[in-house]
């Protein structure tokens, strides 16, 4: 993704550009779902745009995870669990991560798509988030903050398990 308001898909073996996608603002981050069927793009206008990879990168929806996040980048992480459509989103301006279930955006009845559903908010940092990531097995979520801590959360319950201090 780029400030030029595009997301570009490349064939890594040949180096050939396959697709150019238009974005509503400059792109700040990108994440692919575990099954490689969804692509989420965070944009500098506060939007998160969701694309269906299996349908030629058709745009499914655009939503705002953190209101008033304009000009603040998002960090995105899909759960690595097969079949899961959970997307964790952190933002530089906010001291919380939000967990969204985007299954309704792709699980369709006819041609109707539902909106993403907020399923959890991870509160506890005292400053904005630098990054958010699911663990390899999807059981944990780590958030890194400008408050110089890393917090480890239970991905199912949202309970804070550890605060790691010492970063400067």
Image (spheres, grey):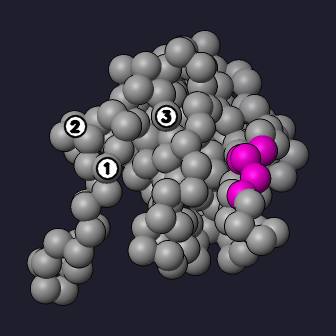
> In the rendered structure, does residue 114 fall within the stretch colored magenta?
yes
The disc placed on residue 86 is: none
Q: Residues within 10 Å of mark 3 (few under 14, many from 20)?
A: many
| Res. 72 visible in picture | no
What SS does tag 1 mark?
Answer: strand
For the residue pair 62 and 46, the one nearer the viewer reads as: 62
Instruction: Tell me if residue 42 can be seen.
Output: yes
Q: Residue 80 or 49: which is nearer the viewer?
A: 49
Please state which of residues 127 and 82 is positioned toward the viewer in this rendering: 82
Residue 81 horizontal side relative to residue 110, left or right: left
Which x, y percent locates residue 15? Answer: 12, 78
Helix, strand or loop at label 2? It is loop
Residue 127 in percent (x, y) is at 54, 15
Q: Is residue 38 magenta?
A: no
- Residue at the image point whose x is 53% and y is 67% from the top: 52
Q: Earlier in the sequence, mark 2 or mark 3?
A: 2
In terms of sequence position, does the residue under pointer 1 or pointer 3 come before the other?
1
Label disc, if present, on residue 3 of the rendered structure: 2
Which one is in front in this view, the residue at disc 1 or the one at disc 3?
1
Say which quarter of the image contains residue 11. bottom left
Label whose residue precedes the other's in the sequence (2 or 1): 2
The circle drawn on residue 22 is: 1
Label number found at residue 47: 3
Front disc: 2 or 1: 1
């Amino acid at each position: 993704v780029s400030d030029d308001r595009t997301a570009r898909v490349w064939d890594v073996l040949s180096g050939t550009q396959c697709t150019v996608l238009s974005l509503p603002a400059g792109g700040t981050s990108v994440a692919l779902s575990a099954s490689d069927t969804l692509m989420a793009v965070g944009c500098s206008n506060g939007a998160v745009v969701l694309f269906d990879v299996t349908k030629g990168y058709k745009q499914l929806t655009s939503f705002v995870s953190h209101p008033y996040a304009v000009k603040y980048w998002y960090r995105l992480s899909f759960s690595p669990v097969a079949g899961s459509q959970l997307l964790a989103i952190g933002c530089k301006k906010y001291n919380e991560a939000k967990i969204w279930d985007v299954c309704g955006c792709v699980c369709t009845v006819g041609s109707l798509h539902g909106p993403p559903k907020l399923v959890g908010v991870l509160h506890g940092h005292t400053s904005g988030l630098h990054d958010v990531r699911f663990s390899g097995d999807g059981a944990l979520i780590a958030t890194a903050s400008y408050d110089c801590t890393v917090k480890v959360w239970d991905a199912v319950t949202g309970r804070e398990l550890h605060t790691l201090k010492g970063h400067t």
